[in-house]
Image (tube, rainbow, N blue to C red):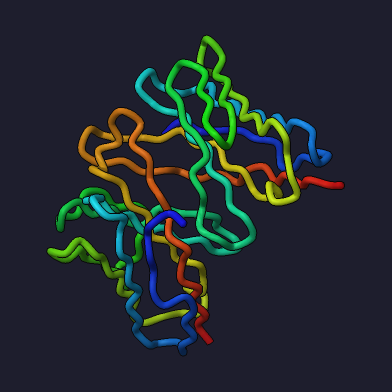
Amino acid sequence: DAKTTQPTSMDCAEGRAANLPCNHSTISGNEYVYWYRQIHSQGPQYIIHGLKNNETNEMASLIITEDRKSSTLILPHATLRDTAVYYCIVSSYTGTASKLTFGTGTRLQVTL
Amino acid sequence: DSGVTQTPKHLITATGQRVTLRCSPRSGDLSVYWYQQSLDQGLQFLIQYYNGEERAKGNILERFSAQQFPDLHSELNLSSLELGDSALYFCASSVEGSGGAGETQYFGPGTRLLVL
């Protein structure tokens, strides 16, 4: 499984963009980058995923570098409710099975 | 709300006992995954089922077992419980479980198990 490296914690002012970086230098060509977040002890919440191209949905944008060795999750206008642990994950699958390997994530604190 | 349901929400039991955690996947999803989250280990993949068959195994102890029923709900059985089994147990589901084309897993709210 490709490993990911994320900063342990980050702060962001409410209303500003939160940019969460992730390194995944050993990612394989067919592995996707996923972002999940976990608010307190709730179930992980899917945010976005991508393979090569940048992606955007109603929650966030995902920017993947051309060499695919790193990515950035962007929350365009962070609110207090975005305070959570954010996990960058490279999914692994064998063609018949898949699993997510969670690291320690980035604890994002959004402040007033 | 992800559409994945888990029962019970909380479970308190004693060492040596056996418990069963239940998971109902999202409508239409055939694959179910179980994860364990403890304070010192983070979120760890335990096992995956697809349409009733085991597909992949992770760090699942021999004291633990799971199954997926014809109606696609899944149960995780934990036996001979130890203090260290206290954790959050999450179930996730996806359409096929093959992971192809960036197949997304959706997580349930979890079951908090406390072993005393």
Q: Residue furthest left?
A: B70
Question: Residue B12 appears at what percent x and percent y?
Answer: 49, 85
Q: Residue at x 31, y 55 (%)?
A: B26
Q: Is B109 above or below relative to A18? A: below
The residue at the point 51 percent across, 33 percent down is A3
Q: Is residue A53 above or below residue B98?
A: above
> Residue B82 vs residue A41: left or right?
left
In front of the other: A53 or A33:
A53
Percent across and percent down for residue A87 are 57, 42
Residue drawn at the location 48% of the way across and 34% of the way down: A34
Residue B43 is situated, as x and y percent measured from the top left of the image, at: 50, 54
In what quadrant of the picture does the N terminus of chain A appear?
Answer: top left
Q: Quadrant of residue B66?
A: bottom left
Q: Please give left or right for residue A73 compared with residue B113 in the image.
A: right
**Residue A51, above or below A103:** above
Q: Quadrant of residue A18?
A: top right
